[in-house]
Image (cartoon, rainbow, N blue to C red):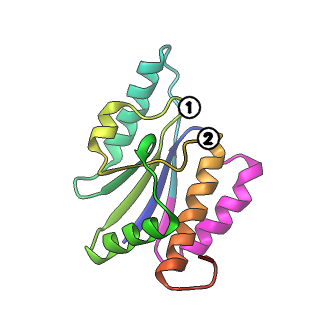
Amino acid sequence: MKIYFWSVGKVHEPYVKEGIEIFTKRISHYYPVEWKIFPSSKSSSTDEIKKSESSQLLGSIQKDDMVVALDENGKQWSSEELAGFIQRRANNSTKNLIFVIGGAYGLHETILKRCDYKWSLSKLVFPHQLVRLILSEQVYRACTIIRNEKYHHS
């Protein structure tokens, strides 16, 4: 299984880039992993921005891809639940597991309908760049839980 992190917006800001790179490299010890950054839309209305960005994302998703939207209305998972989710995808021979972070205004309903799961990191609102760092750290943490390694203390 390959894990993809897709995000709409600017490239990683320097204040989070190092952390994202560290956790992405650590994840690569368990699964192939790749980041893809999609450009933000320059449309005039919020709805048009979300539609345009979601259209880019939808155009890159393959039929058999398992897609998880990071969405404020999604289900919250514990680290152990995330680990179980990833392990089940691997056991079910999922080829590509894609975590999608929307742009400044979130994801449009068209892509949310295509997503297999909607996951909320928290009821709190985080800066877009920090969501990338939190996501990469939590997926790394899940990998260590799956392997029963020391990183996660429960």
Front residue (pair 1, 36): 1
Q: Secondary structure at mark 1?
A: loop
Instruction: Pinpoint residue 114: horizontal percent, then vertical percent.
Output: 27, 43
Q: Quadrant of the C terminus?
A: bottom right
Within-10-Å neighbours for mark 1: few <14, some 14–19, many 20+: some
Residue 17 visible from this viewpoint: yes
Asked which secondary structure carries label 2, the reply is helix
Query: What residue would you read off at disc 1?
Result: 104
Disc 1 marks a residue whose amino acid type is Ala
The magenta-colored residue range is 11-34
Image coordinates of residue 48 in percent, x first then y, are 42, 20
Amino acid carrying label 2: it is His
The N terminus is located in which quarter? bottom left
Q: Furthest-left residue in view?
A: 63
What residue lies at 60% left-to-right and 38% top-to-bottom?
Answer: 125
Q: Residue at x 37, y 74 (%)?
A: 87
Circle 2 Cα neighbour tier, 10 Å, few/some/many (<14 / 14–19 / ≥20) = some
Q: Residue at x 61, y 56 (%)?
A: 134
Along the line of sight, the residue nearer the viewer: 42 or 132: 132
Is 3 positioned to the left or the right of 19 in the image? left
- Quick one: which residue is furthest to the right in this view? 15
Q: Which residue is mark 2?
A: 128
State the CA–CA distance, disc 2 to disc 1.
7 Å
Residue pictured at 27% horizontal, 39% vertical: 113
Query: Where is residue 117 drawn, in percent x and y?
Result: 34, 51
Farthest top residue in view:
44
